[in-house]
Image (cartoon, helix red, strand yellow):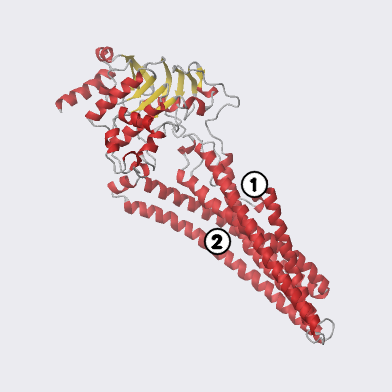
Amino acid sequence: MVRRAENGADLLDREKSRRVGALAELWPFLRPYRLLLLSAMTALVLTAAVALLLPMAVRRVVDNFGARDGALLDQYFGAALFIAGLLALGTGARYLLVTRLGERVVADIRKAVFDRVIGMSPAFYERLMTGEVLSRITTDTTLILSVIGSSISIALRNLLLFVGGMALMLLTSAKLTGLVLLIVPLVIVPILTLGRRMRVLSRENQDWIAQSSGKASEALLSVQTVQAFTHEGASRAQFADVTERSFEAARRRVNTRALMTVIVIFLVFTGIVGVLWIGARDVRAGEMTAGSLVQFVIYSVMVAGAVAALSEIWGELQRAAGATERLVGLLQAEDPVKDPVRPVPVPRPVKGEIGFHAVRFAYPARPGIPALDDFTLTIRPGETVALVGPSGAGKTSVIQLILRFYDPDAGRITLDGVALSDMARHEFRREMALVPQDPVIFAASARENIRFGRLDASDAEIEAAARAANAHDFIAALPQGYDTFVGERGVMLSGGQKQRIAIARAILRDAPVLLLDEATSALDAESERAVQTAVEAMARSRTTIIVAHRLATVKKADRIVVMDHGRIVAQGTHESLVAENGLYARLARLQFTDGQAA
């Protein structure tokens, strides 16, 4: 039903929780705000205590209705009003403190989860949809917010009212309290029985919500492809199916909760009516005062209301427990690619020598199909190396491994003689600039998209990089120039314009290692020639690795490495490889002959 994480642990469908105690996992997030938590608990206890005092004041008023001393009656009414005022102030303070605590903790949880998942390697996301992760950050944290900011405090308050009310009921009338206690087992049984069923349904409901979020995210991010293939109907049907399954789980959960509420409230208030009938007979017999009976009834209503509230909140706590488990699962998930405990410093200055030593690698989703097989290659500092070959030859996999998005199954990869696995990823990645085959454009201005390459770059440096990438003219022609918002994923730009912005971003980064993965594939001939000139100029002072299908873009490379089925089958200059009459020569004839024919 859901996708499983790479390490085999199911983050989204873990073993069903059997206890609300899973909420204890929230304590690390509550700990920094102990003072705020203590203040909220103090306000909660005080309001519960004040609420328990109110029936005593009511008893005094009732018992003194017939008193000749009106001043005494006024005092009792004044005391009741004072207690009501304290209750109002305490309740307001409790709401303020608890709500603020909930918002603060949930904000911290969201940040912690995002901090964790943003650093996960692509291997982690091979079997986990990003839409499902986003659902956890939004839907599950909203559940936790409702619990911390409301449900837990209400539950504790009602628990105090239940315990205190029972104690004061016992002091008021032990006989009537004994009769009330006979009802308690009848109330607890449906809470435990139906509560277990509700917990399972709540978790199922949340899982389907996460899947619907993943489906919607996937379809909307690819909306042009969906529409181009007239796949709207199928996408609607898939989303509707998942949403209906979520609704069905929610309907069963709501029905179960409603049934539990009906049973509990009916049993509780039936018991109260029976006890009140017996109490009324005791008043008529002179065994207790009318005020005492009223006091007992109020306490009974408090206790009954507390039990009913606890039965409803129990379901919310169970849902939040499941949400907490899922979020903690993300926080504790193991990244298949890990930084060493004591990372080796990146050699300074970085020369840019890259070495592949007998590397074997298969993607986790395709473990039986090697992307690289006994791959050995040394790229000298400042050398421009082009990787060519048919689709599936393993060219892009070389780029993925240099950035350590994945770890090889065997062999080692080095930068200036130091294994990548011995260094911190964010340290050596600072020395690399990437232009991917599918350029990523953020929902920001053109200027901010280029500045992504180096956040401290000045506007002049950004413009210079754009000129070098042949992007300045079209950016300047935009409605607000460099400050024009380019839309989500750059929907306002053409494919070639996106690629030129991505190239400008890499130029601005000015890193010693430049990685170009089909960087000019979306450019027209004129733009490609201009960008190629910029890339050649930039490549003179840095190590450059170019992945290309179009051989015209790599003819001037210092060395061309021909790959097939994850192995190197030939390497040399354009002229020498053509003379060998091997795979490269065959590819060259296909491309250049077709081009001349065209």
The quarter of the picture where residue 49 lies is bottom right
Helix or strand or loop: what does disc 2 sit on?
Answer: helix
How many dots with numbers?
A: 2
Quadrant location, the C terminus: top left
Q: Nearer the viewer, residue 286 or 197?
A: 286
Q: CA distance from mark 1 to mark 2?
A: 24 Å
Tell me the residue that label 2 is attached to: 253
Query: Does residue 7 appear left or right of residue 280 in this picture?
Result: left
Q: Nearer the viewer, residue 358 or 129?
A: 129
Residue 51 in picture, x, y percent from top left:
72, 68
Q: Say above or below: 119 vs 349.
A: below
**From where the camera sits, is residue 142 visible?**
yes
Helix or strand or loop: what does disc 1 sit on?
Answer: helix
Query: Does residue 85 appear left or right of residue 2 in this picture?
Result: right
Asked whether disc 1 touches disc 2, contact meaning CB atoms under 8 Å apart, the reply is no
Of pointers 1 and 2, the one earlier in the residue sequence = 1
Q: Say above or below: 438 vs 15.
A: above
Amino acid type at image mark 1? Glu
Amino acid type at image mark 2? Arg
Q: Residues within 10 Å of mark 2 (few under 14, many from 20)?
A: many
Q: Say above or below: 107 vs 495.
A: below
Q: Say above or below: 309 vs 490.
A: below
Q: Residues within 10 Å of mark 1 (few under 14, many from 20)?
A: some
Residue at left 83%, top 71%? 171
Residue at left 64%, top 52%? 18
Tell me the residue that label 1 is attached to: 25
Residue 432 in picture, x, y percent from top left:
43, 25
Query: Does residue 444 appear left or right of residue 28 in this picture?
Result: left
